[in-house]
Image: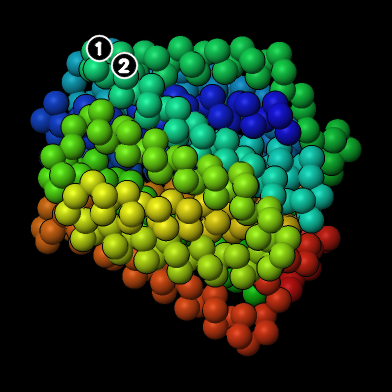
Amino acid sequence: MAAVMLAVFVDLVGFGIVLPLLPLWAERFGASPFVIGALLASYAVMQFLLAPVWGRISDRYGRRPVILVALAGSALAALALGFADALWVIFLARVFHGAAGASYSVAQAYVADITTPQQRARAMGLIGAAFGVGFIAGPAIGAASAAVDVRLPFFVAAGLATINFALAWVRLPESLDQRLRARTSPSRLSLLRRAFMERGLAPLVWMSFVATLAFVGMEATFALFVERRLDFGPPEVAWAFVYIGLLAAASQGVFVGRLVGRYGESRVLLAGLIVTGVGLGGLAFVTNVPSLLLALLPLSFGSGLVFATTTALISRSVSDTEQGVALGITASVSGLARIGAPLGATALFQAIDPGAPLVVGGVLFLGCAVAIGTALARGSHGFGEVPITGSARDV
């Protein structure tokens, strides 16, 4: 667990260095808000296409080789961003980074391999905390290095990814038992059918899509929003992401396990959806830094609860031989949301108002809360809290 958390943490430090600065970096090459949305969506296109493929490869050949390939790809992508001298180079680097980043679900499958179903939500929360802490350190490093030179953050990210590859090569053991790799897993088409139709699994997959759509819409326009509304530059944007990462890390690393142990995954998920929706909608109306910090508090904390519990519930809904491909399909669905969200959010930002994507996102989160709350009121059992032991079994 420590080894995979370290790999995720260092990877997300590099990711956190790049993401807040990428829209402003693209603007230097003449990109409009909509073109920036397309740039961010290109990463998601690769996730959509490759996440199930990486997951299935990891089910057959193991998690370790896939994670190592992904870390090497992240280093090359960051290096290309640093040397970029045209917008098409930035697009190419982003696409390549998306191909490498599509393996994040493999890290989640790694965690599923080494935990029991009862430990899963807490373990996914710890991985999410490593993700969040990476976003604390990443934007801080990005802000400091951007003050020296606008290209330096990308070279720093490339260096960290290279170090991460070396550490994982030495410290990260294989998690998937050889006997499980030898078993025949169901076809991807069969799992796709289950993911979109099975009563215990489909609501989680659909909710993951909608929640990701809403949250990524905020990510895609946040730098531009605070630039317009509060006159933020690259250092201020990076520090805002530090604040978001700190809150998300506390939510997933400290509170998810405790809350799930007391109330169960489904109720924690419901609470997280409501809190995130309120925070996201409130963010649209900030007028100064104190109101920004206040709105980001429920947004960051609640989203940490939502994504950790959703991943845990999906993992518990499939068998041990299906973890990689099932979480890969979920990542692919989220990738589909990441394709549409930047395009839709930046279009709303440009055509209506900078706060429009945030209001729409808040409504989507609250709509998910209504759907989950209705299912719980009708007595549905927690969306996958009872693990499925056979690939053909329907809830």
Q: Residue at x 26, y 49 (%)?
A: 290
Would you name the residue on which mark 1 appears? 148
**Number of other residues with Cα within 10 Å of mark 1, as a class: few under 14, some 14 to 19, many 20 or more:** few
Tag count? 2
Instruction: Name the image quarter holding the C terminus.
Output: bottom right
Q: Residue at the far front: name it.
A: 290
The reply, left or right, for residue 36 in relation to residue 384 is left
Name the residue nearer the viewer: 158 or 262: 262
Q: Looking at the picture, how far across and down is residue 280, in whole percent? A: 34, 60
Q: Are marks 1 and 2 in contact (CB under 8 Å)?
A: yes
Viewer-nearest residue: 364 or 198: 364
The residue sitting at 18% across, 20% down in the picture is 86
Does dot 1 land on a helix, a strand or a loop?
loop
Image: 81 above or below 254: above
The residue singled out by tag 2 in the image is 145
The three-letter amino acid code for the residue at tag 1 is Val
- Image position, residue 95 (x, y; %): 37, 32
